[in-house]
Amino acid sequence: MMKIARQLKEQNIAEYLIYMWQVEDLIRANGCDLDRLRQNLVSRYPADEQPALEEWYGQLCEMMRTEGVVEQGHLQICRNVLLELIDLHARLLSSTRYPFYNAAYFKALPFIVELRRKSSHPDEPELETCFEALYGLLLLRLQKKEVTPETAKAMEAITAFLSLLANYYEKDARGELEE
């Protein structure tokens, strides 16, 4: 899982963020208890990978306790990624060089507005709303629950928008983004 997180962070920052939120929830489901994580998750991996996984989960548990996100919320490492994406989003929108990004954003915007209207956190950043929607869709699919056509349409626009943002994030990280 640690390797997956590292690969996702390098290859697709949006998938990394969703993955880390899932890891946070796995830790919460195990009571932020390393013994339970060892028994329920770490033990399923090859013996040579277990020590590193156990250390990683232990560090994440400690961070969650220290940061006060054992019950809810997100680790600072996840919040930092979101802040970087929010900054990049603002830079892309303010530039005339990225019309496709602007088009994807404005296509997703009505759905974002509707999600924020229905949200218990209407003042959160738009990107956080998008990621929460994407994570909610993942949870629905994991539970094998039906996704309405309206939700599917909204998520298609939001996914395309976030995918484009993730691609620009990679370019920015490599110094290839023109502003």
Image: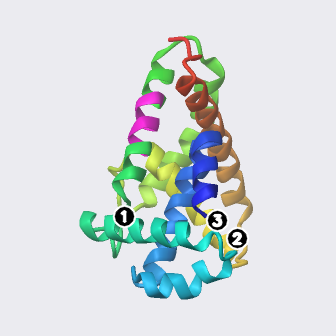
Q: Nearer the viewer, residue 4 or 131?
A: 4
Neighbour tally class for label 1: few under 14, some 14-19, many 20 plus, Cα within 10 Å: few
Label 2 sits on a secondary structure element that is helix
Q: What residue appears at the point 43 percent right and 55 percent down from the top-left corner?
A: 117
Please give left or right for residue 111 compared with residue 24 in the image.
right
Magenta residue span:
82-88
Amino acid beneath label 2: Arg
Q: Mark 2 vs mark 1: give the one in front.
A: 2
- Between 127 and 83, the one nearer to me in the picture: 83
* 60 w.r.t. 164: above or below: below
Q: Is residue 105 magenta?
A: no
Of the two numbered discs 3 and 1 on the same chain, state the one appearing first in sequence: 1
- What's the CA distance linking mark 3 and mark 1? 19 Å
Element type at mark 1: loop
On screen, residue 156 versus residue 118, left or right, reads: right
Q: Quadrant of residue 158?
A: top right
Q: Is residue 146 left or right of residue 106?
A: right
**Residue displayed at 54% across by 24% down:** 172
* Screen quadrant of the N terminus: bottom right
Mark 3 vs 2: CB contact within 8 A: yes
Q: Residues within 10 Å of mark 3 (few under 14, many from 20)?
A: some
Sequence-wise, which precedes: disc 2 or disc 1? 1
Q: Which residue is mark 3?
A: 138
Q: Main secondary structure of the magenta part?
A: helix
Residue found 46% across the figure and 68% down from its top: 55
> Is 101 drawn above or below residue 69 in the view shown?
above
Q: Residue furthest front?
A: 48
Disc 3 is placed on an element classified as: helix
Disc 2 marks which residue?
141
The residue wearing badge 1 is 120
Q: Residue 149, located in which quarter of the rendered image?
A: bottom right
